[in-house]
Amino acid sequence: MSNLTTASRLRKGLTLGAIAILATTTFAGCASTGASAGATSSGGSAVNIAFLGYAAANGYSKSSFEAAQAAAEKMGGTVTFFDGKFDGATQLAQARDAIASGKYQALEIMPNNSEQMAPVVKDALAKGIKVAAIDYAIGADPTDVTKAGVDGITVQIADNMAEGGQVQGQKAADLCKGIDPCKAMIVIGSKSSEFDVIKLNEIKKVLAANPNIQIVNESALAFDEAKVQQATADVLQANPDLNLIITTGDQNCFGAERAADAAGKQFTATTKAGGGDIACLGWGASIEGVQEILAGKWPSSIALVPGTFGAKAAETLIDAVRDPSTPQLITTQTALSPVGRIVDKTILEANPTFLGEWNK
């Protein structure tokens, strides 16, 4: 699947995808065992996948689900979305219900809590249900993406979040060279998220090695653009010479940009002494974020490919259900990404078919 095709489909299909999510977030009643499946017109057995997403109210989850759904349909499979509501306990209960229902031959999981989900994955595998961990590894240490977090898992396509934090921190350090102090604001999603905390810690390790960088505010605002807009407005009142905003989500840059516009500041791809211009580092390379970078408003964004990994996981799960000799797939997002770890304007112009794979 080309990235141009993925991006175009996601743009056109977002509304339909949201409708599909609303239509499929209920659980099936108990049926026969998960191994039972009828034949399909494609010649293979029917495969039903339970897609356990972060949350329905999340464009990243939706885009990955839609890509998985489209890939599965081509192979005679189905994918049903479960709304994890950004809550580990909710998602854990949904996974248990999906297993107990006997309806699903495979689970595709975006884990809200990596370690908490491990026992239910082991239970699913013991029952012959194939499992994919996508975006993050499932297990005691989600930072170790070189091996399966759970023995016997069918697919693991994990983001090396620690590496991402290091790359984000180094990009900030590069932008702040020659500026002392270089005033920075950090905006993450949640300090209750193990994934965001890992990214934050790695970012701050790099910043600590650059004494010219002064962190004037650190906020966790649930990727809520309105909250980020208000927080940024408050920071700009106290620090009109703000140089840099470092985020773990493109959504945060969009909220901050509205506050900057209102304060008469410009979002640019560079920083300068004395403020006025503000650089915002995105995370995710959303469809909208890619356009901001190409327009010269953002320096860069950490590249994530939810459409690619959502589809690849679904395809591999279906293959594994139909043929148990299908090789285990353990890889990373970056290994699947056509643009590497981070995108800037130069990289995007050199890869014109990459338009981003999710709507913010």
Image (cartoon, grey):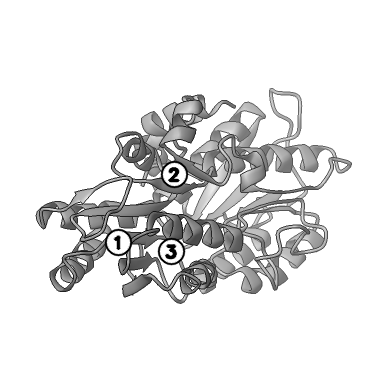
Mark 1 or mark 3: which is in front? 1
Given the current orientation, which residue lies at the most extreme front position? 178
Mark 2 or mark 3: which is in front? 2
Give yes or no for contact between labels 1 and 2 (Cβ–Cβ under 8 Å).
no
Cα–Cα span, label 1 and label 2: 17 Å
Residue 148 image position (x, y, % from top left):
77, 59
Residue pointed to by mark 1: 224
| Quarter-of-image position of residue 57 | bottom left
Which residue is found at the position 18% from the left and 53% from the top?
258
Q: Nearer the viewer, residue 326 or 265?
A: 265
Local crowd size for mark 1, using a 10 Å CA cut-off: few (<14), some (14–19), many (≥20): some
- Callout 2 amino acid: Ala
Residue 199 image position (x, y, % from top left):
52, 66
On screen, residue 24 versus residue 145, left or right, reads left
- Callout 3 amino acid: Lys
Q: Is residue 238 above or below residue 347?
A: below
